[in-house]
Image (spheres, rainbow, N blue to C red):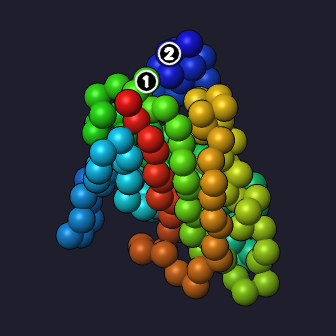
Amino acid sequence: MSVYDTLARLGIELPGAGAPAAAYVMAAQTGNTVFLSGHIARKDGKPWAGKLGKDLTTEDGKAAARAIAIDLLATLHAHLGDLNRVTRVVKLMSLVNSTLEFTEQHLVTNGASEFLVEVFGDAGKHARSAFGVAQIPLGACVEIELIVEVK
């Protein structure tokens, strides 16, 4: 099944790809590996601000991570022209803006990880890291970067 058929079945229409906010590119490719820059959580077109364990719940963070995964696919689509070229999601790194007491960064990150498996099946299963951090640019609650292999 086409990645686009799967997205349609899930009721997802990819947004336009975001633009870099500083001196970097959104995607860099070397050989068959594509590195996507960190994408912050957005809600209603604005940074989804807040701190997990203070302003936001784990479920809020999980929803934010899923939204970021959709944005990452939009960037990847803009870079590749066809998401069906993805052969493997290799690595996901998640930064979760959280209090010192919050310990569910891994559950927040599941929002992105589970979505990528929904879209790519076994090829969406990946290595990953999830970190709690004191702050993310623009006060965003979550930031995620992605590495994929393509044909």
| Residue in view at x 37 percent, y 47 percent | 34
Q: Which residue is mark 1?
A: 84
Crowding around mark 1 (Cα neighbors within 10 Å: few <14, some 14 to 19, many 20+) is some
Q: Secondary structure at mark 2?
A: loop
Q: Which residue is mark 2?
A: 2
Task: Choose top left, top right, bottom left or bottom right for residue 39.
Answer: bottom left
| Residue in view at x 76 percent, y 58 percent | 107
Q: Nearer the viewer, residue 123 or 7?
A: 123
State if disc 1 and disc 2 touch (CB < 8 Å): yes
Residue 83: x and y, percent? Answer: 41, 28
Residue 75: x and y, percent? Answer: 35, 43
Residue 118: x and y, percent? Answer: 66, 31
Image quadrant in which the N terminus is located: top right
User: Is residue 46 found left or right of 106 in the rendered image?
Assistant: left
Q: Is residue 146 visible?
A: yes
Image quadrant in which the C terminus is located: top left
| Residue in view at x 50 percent, y 22 percent | 3
Which residue is outermost to the front? 31
Task: Choose top left, top right, bottom left or bottom right for residue 137.
Answer: bottom left
